[in-house]
Image: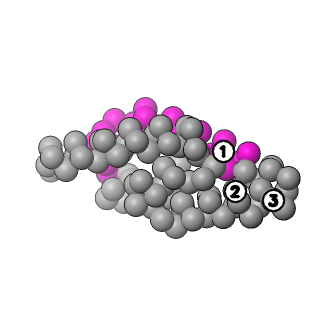
């Protein structure tokens, strides 16, 4: 059983990650907030390096992924969000 304090602490990360995913999704900041550094680094590097090489197309794609993930984060129930992103460390969508 999940403790209420642990769940509520992670629920505040859920809101912060969701908002950052919507607003700054291409930089992967929402993944860093959740402790998913591999996914965050991939998004950041693809946006910066790939964005320069593809005239911004890669950054736009990463921004769209961030937007989708931010909406998913904010619409998931707290218990499901905690299970998927804190316990299972789900990296993508």
Provide the secondary structure element on which disc 2 rests. Answer: helix
Q: Are marks 2 and 1 in contact (CB under 8 Å)?
A: yes
Q: Are marks 2 and 3 in contact (CB under 8 Å)?
A: no
Provide the secondary structure element on which disc 1 rests. Answer: helix
Q: Nearer the viewer, residue 58 or 87?
A: 58
Asked whether, in this view, residue 8 is left or right of residue 40, the answer is left
Colour basis: one colour
Residue visible at 80% across and 50% down in the picture: 56
Read off the magenta span: 60-83
Sooner in the amino-acid sequence: mark 2 or mark 1: 2
Mark 2–mark 1 Cα distance, whole angstroms, equals 8 Å
Mark 3–mark 1 Cα distance, whole angstroms, equals 15 Å
Badge 3 local density, few (<14 within 10 Å), some, or many (20+)? few
Residue 64 appears anywhere in the view? yes
Residue visible at 41% across and 53% down in the picture: 33
Badge 2 local density, few (<14 within 10 Å), some, or many (20+)? many
The residue that label 1 is drawn on is 63
Q: Nearer the viewer, residue 7 or 44?
A: 44
Answer above or below: position of 29 versus 80.
below
The residue that label 3 is drawn on is 52
Answer above or below: position of 35 versus 30.
below
The residue that label 2 is drawn on is 47
Numbered circle sitting on residue 5: none
């Amino acid at each position: 059983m999940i403790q209420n304090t642990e769940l509520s602490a992670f629920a505040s990360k859920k809101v912060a990650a969701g908002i950052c995913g919507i607003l700054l999704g291409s930089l992967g900041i929402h993944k860093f907030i959740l402790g998913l550094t591999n996914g965050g680094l991939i998004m950041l590097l693809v946006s910066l390096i790939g964005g320069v090489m593809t005239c911004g197309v890669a950054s736009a794609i990463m921004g769209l992924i961030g937007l989708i993930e931010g909406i998913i984060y904010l619409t998931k129930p707290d218990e499901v969000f905690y299970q998927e992103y804190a316990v299972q460390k789900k990296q993508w969508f």
